[in-house]
């Protein structure tokens, strides 16, 4: 792909990156957990591009990263019966490595949730990631920056050249500080359920909201 834009933490032009993303371009960027690939939520072409770049099945949902907790209710419903527990999880683990599954609002494109009625939401604990997300409105569909089935990159050096060729913007942020994918907890139903363990342990979650 020609006209690739490559930045590091010292020379990133957020205005330029924001304009490129809003025009439908894709970005590889560091988060606190692993490197991610993303595009704006307003462009279904960009979201489709993420799937195509990863060779990912459209039956596997993306998640949404937010720049602050208040952005959650722009894209998802917080059921009152679970509100207290969700607020406890956010207070303890955000920003950080916990993805929370909630019922999605109609503004979330079906293509990025595999036509499901839920969406995963997380606030990363890394300034460069938060600044990128904030530059496009504070809501950003994303997933790990690798071709499906290959290892998840924990640093810029671990990004595959093949995958880098599939996007328009690349941010070299060195090594992700955590280096482990987020834990996913489903808070959309009657009973909380851990769908994937990662940066946050089940014990930490149970210590926060009780036995699950």
Image: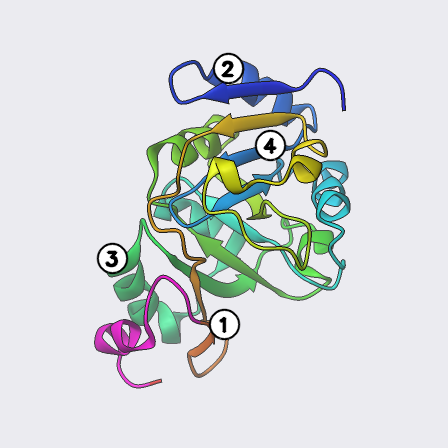
Quadrant the C terminus occupies:
bottom left
The spot of residue 122 in percent (x, y) is: 43, 53
In space, the residues marked 3 and 2 are separated at their CA atoms by: 31 Å
Where, quadrant-wise, is the N terminus in this rendering? top right
Could you give the CA–CA distance between mark 4 and mark 3, rounded to whole angstroms?
Answer: 29 Å
Residue 51's place in the image compared with 59, above or below, is above
In this rendering, position of residue 201 left or right of residue 23: left
Foreground residue among 17 and 169: 169
Foreground disc of the pair 1, 2? 2
Q: Nearer the viewer, mark 4 or mark 3?
A: 4
Q: Position of residue 130 (x, y in %)?
A: 40, 35
Q: CA distance from mark 1 to mark 4?
A: 29 Å
Query: In x, y percent, where is residue 167?
Result: 68, 31
Asked whether residue 207 is drawn in magenta, I would say yes
Residue that numbered label 2 is attached to: 15
Q: Earlier in the sequence, mark 4 or mark 3?
A: 4
Front residue of 183/186: it is 183
Q: Which mark is residue 27?
A: 4
Residue in the foreground of this view, choosing between 131 and 168: 168
SS class of the residue under badge 3?
A: helix
Residue in the picture at 55% in, 14% down: 16
The mark total stands at 4
Which residue carries the number 1 mark?
A: 188
Segment tinted magenta in the rendering: 197-211
Tell me which numbered mark, 1 or 3, is placed earlier along the sequence.
3
Q: Nearer the viewer, residue 85 or 9?
A: 9
Sequence-first tag of 2 and 4? 2
Residue pointed to by mark 3? 91
Q: Residues within 10 Å of mark 1 (few under 14, many from 20)?
A: many
């Amino acid at each position: 792909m020609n006209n690739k834009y490559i930045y590091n933490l010292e020379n990133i032009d957020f205005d330029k990156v924001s304009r490129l993303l809003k025009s439908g371009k894709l970005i590889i960027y560091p988060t606190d957990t692993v490197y991610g690939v993303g595009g704006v939520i307003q462009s279904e072409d960009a979201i489709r591009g993420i799937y195509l770049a990863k060779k990912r099945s459209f039956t596997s949902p993306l998640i949404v990263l937010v720049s602050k907790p208040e952005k959650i209710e722009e894209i998802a419903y917080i059921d009152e019966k679970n509100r207290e527990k969700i607020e406890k999880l956010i207070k303890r683990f955000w920003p950080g490595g916990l993805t929370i599954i909630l019922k999605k609002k109609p503004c979330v494109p079906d293509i990025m949730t595999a036509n499901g009625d839920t969406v995963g939401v997380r606030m990363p604990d890394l300034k460069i990631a938060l600044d990128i997300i904030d530059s496009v409105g504070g809501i950003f569909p994303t997933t790990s920056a690798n071709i499906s089935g290959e290892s998840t990159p924990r640093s810029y050096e671990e990004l595959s050249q093949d995958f880098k060729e599939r996007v328009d913007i690349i941010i070299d942020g060195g090594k992700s500080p955590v280096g482990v994918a987020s834990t996913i907890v489903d808070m959309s139903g009657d009973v909380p359920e851990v769908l994937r363990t990662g940066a946050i342990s089940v014990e930490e979650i149970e210590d926060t909201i009780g036995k699950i």
